[in-house]
Image: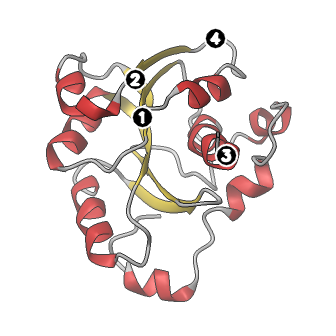
């Protein structure tokens, strides 16, 4: 059974944050639902790969190819470096990561991403947490409202949910002070 809220938030948050996404890479072992969400967009080129062998798959990808990478796993240092390498100069990624209460694991991932990305922000995806890392665009300041408002057929995602997903309680802000970049 599909978790439509997770799928919609994994896809539409980055797609409605990037100014002009054209090339998208999806790394997931169950990418069919993510691909269905991406079909709502015209004029994009999507490549899907299984995340089980993400490192090997990413090593074969050309530098600076993708605008967005959607990754449904938690990457280690090597995978995160390759994600950065395959992204264009204004690229961004959305990736699953440990629960926000797992502070040390999250800090490690965020610190590695901090070597490559200007903006690193966790967001809620209804039943889990996702991390958005961006080289250029801020997910709440640069949201393309027209794009998010013109999407049809979602059960969960809309422009208000996009912005609200980034609201964090004070204890999270304190735990990640200096690590989250917004």
* Residue 93 appears anywhere in the view: yes
Is residue 99 shown above or below 48?
below
Question: Which residue sits at x=26%, y=76%?
Answer: 104
Report the residue at 42% width, 79% height from top. 101
Q: Position of residue 124 (x, y in %)?
A: 59, 62
Residue 91's label in the rendered image is: 1
User: At 50% across and 28% down in the image, what residue appears?
Assistant: 31
Whole-angstrom CA distance, mark 4 to mark 1, is: 17 Å
Sequence-first disc among 3 and 1: 1
Q: Is residue 72 above or below residue 179?
A: above
> Which quarter of the figure is the N terminus placed in?
top right
Under circle 2, the secondary element is: strand
Dot 4 or dot 3: first in sequence order is: 4
Is 62 placed left or right of 9 in the picture? left
Residue under label 3: 143
- Mark 2 surroundings: few (<14), some (14-19) or many (≥20) residues within 10 A: many
Q: Marks 1 and 3: in contact by CB < 8 Å?
A: no
Q: Which residue corresponds to the image point at 63% horizontal and 54% vertical from the top-left? A: 141
Residue beneath label 4, please? 43
Disc 1 to disc 2: CB gap under 8 Å: yes
Q: Earlier in the sequence, mark 3 or mark 2?
A: 2
């Amino acid at each position: 059974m599909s978790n439509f809220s997770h799928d919609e938030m994994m896809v539409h948050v980055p797609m409605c944050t990037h100014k002009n996404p054209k090339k998208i890479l999806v790394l997931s072992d169950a990418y069919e639902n993510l691909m269905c969400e991406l079909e709502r967009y015209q004029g994009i080129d999507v490549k899907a790969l299984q995340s089980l062998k993400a490192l090997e798959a990413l090593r074969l990808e050309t530098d600076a190819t993708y605008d967005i990478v959607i990754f449904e796993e938690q990457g280690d240092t090597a995978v995160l470096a390759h994600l950065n390498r395959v992204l264009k100069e204004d690229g961004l990624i959305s990736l699953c990561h440990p629960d926000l209460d797992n502070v040390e694991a999250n800090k490690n991932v965020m610190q590695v991403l901090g070597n490559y990305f200007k903006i690193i922000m966790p967001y809620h995806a209804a039943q889990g947490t996702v991390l958005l890392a961006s080289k250029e665009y801020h997910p709440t300041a640069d949201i393309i409202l027209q794009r998010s408002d013109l999407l049809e057929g979602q059960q969960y995602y809309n422009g208000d949910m996009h912005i609200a997903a980034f609201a964090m309680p004070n204890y999270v802000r304190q735990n990640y002070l200096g690590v989250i970049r917004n």
